[in-house]
Amino acid sequence: MKFTRIIKPITLMDYMLSCISNGKRSDLFKHPAIDNTFYDEGIAIADSIGVANTNCKLRINGGKVLMTRAKVAKGKEWIHSYANKIEVISNDAANYNIIEDVVANIASSFLSNRKLFKSRKSKPPKPKLSWKSGRGGEIIITVINGKNYNPMHTHFIILEKSMNAKVSIVNEEVIIEMKKMGNVRFKSVNAKGKNTTIKGTGRGEDMEVYAYSQNGNNSLSDLSAKLSIEG
């Protein structure tokens, strides 16, 4: 069951209590790995959902639908927090030898392993670039990798050639080292976008362009080869 889709208050309450019961019994997730105060907070929230639902149904103690929904939202927040803790512990290298162990770890928490598996997307493709002149001094930069190029984002770095800059990607960080100050521009396109347009400097300045792509798991590609553009 995917808890984000649970609508009925009592169903969510039961789901929370099952998570708490399983978590507190698990050798991996019991105190002190997950503190008992966190589990106690979950029990209190689950109980408040049950009380709010009863008050609403019987129309007593000022029970209202909106109040019940607020308690349900609070319960889902707690489960999200629980899921984050379970993910960290389950994927700790000290707690598994093979990927099937991670599945077993997560199963003991009462949560779905589909929700908690770390993304294992491959590294996004390195862009290949070309350029052509457009209207009014515009320059159109195009990714020419082909139809199978479909990262989440493509990012472009545009620098003046006179800066004599060195651009690199190290540990998922973009580093620009400049020997001379100059104009640096950044542009991004989403999804399958393959083109971006830039304005010339108007000074006949030669430019250098680099690009890299990014997947939904924030993994960065290798940096493209330098594209030189004559001003």
Image (cartoon, rainbow, N blue to C red):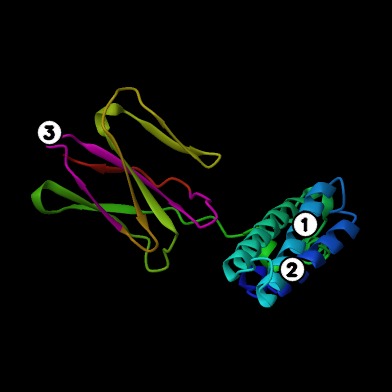
Residue 50 bears which disc, if any?
Answer: 2
Circles 2 and 3: CB atoms closer than 8 Å: no
Circles 1 and 2: CB atoms closer than 8 Å: no
Circle 1 residue: 44
> Which segment did they paint magenta?
195-221
- Asked whether residue 35 appears in the rendered view, the answer is no
Q: Is residue 133 left or right of residue 214?
A: left
Q: Is residue 87 left or right of residue 96?
A: left
* Number of numbered discs on residues: 3
| 6, 137: nearer the viewer | 6
Residue 231: image location, x then y, percent: 16, 39
Residue at 40% over, 35% down: 167
Amino acid type, callout 3: Arg
Residue 79: image location, x then y, percent: 70, 60
Q: Secondary structure at mark 2?
A: helix
Label 2, label 3: how many angstroms apart (C-alpha)?
70 Å
Circle 3 residue: 203
Amino acid type, callout 2: Gly
Q: Earlier in the sequence, mark 2 or mark 3?
A: 2
| 161, 4: nearer the viewer | 4
Residue 99: image location, x then y, percent: 77, 61
